Amino acid sequence: MNAVFRSISVAGLILTLFPSFFVFGGMMTPETHKLLMLVGTVFWFAAAPFWMRPEDKQ
């Protein structure tokens, strides 16, 4: 399950990074960029806490 959350959070990071390059290159509209950035941010903040929290030591 940990790998699933990591994959979702990496997808979120990709969605926040690559659209900026596409807008800069003229291959994407700013409106699409904003939508992909929003989706990527939601993915990151929804998935990252589940695999980044420290393990319980008992």
Image (tube, rainbow, N blue to C red):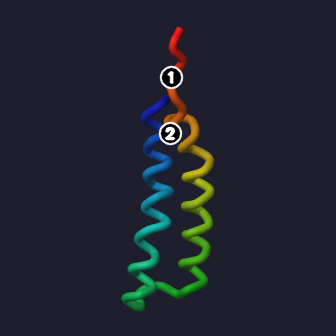
> Taking 18 as reference, is 39 left or right?
right
Question: Of all residues shown, which one is farthest toward the bottom?
Answer: 26
Disc 2 and disc 1: Cα gap in Å?
A: 15 Å
Q: Which residue was labeled with disc 1?
A: 55
Residue at left 50%, top 39%? 5
Query: Within 10 Å of the Cα at label 2, are there few (<14), some (14-19), or many (20+) other Cα atoms?
Result: some
Q: Which numbered disc covers residue 5?
A: 2
In the rendered structure, which amino acid carries the disc numbered 1?
A: Glu
In the rendered structure, which amino acid carries the disc numbered 2?
A: Phe
> Taking 13 as reference, is 31 left or right?
right
**Mark 2 or mark 1: which is in front?**
1
Query: Considering the numbered disc 1 on the image, is that residue within a helix, a strand or a loop?
Result: loop
For the residues labelled 2 and 1, say whether their Cβ atoms are less than 8 Å apart.
no
Residue 36 appears in which quarter of the rendering? bottom right
35, above or below 41, in the image: below
Residue at left 43%, top 68%? 17
43, above or below 17, in the image: above
Can you give x and y, in whole percent of width and height, for residue 16 in the image?
A: 49, 66
Can you give x and y, in whole percent of width and height, for residue 35 in the image?
A: 61, 73
Residue at left 62%, top 47%? 46
49, above or below 30, in the image: above
Residue at left 53%, top 8%? 58
Residue 37 appears in which quarter of the rendering? bottom right
Can you give x and y, in whole percent of width and height, for residue 2 in the image?
A: 47, 31
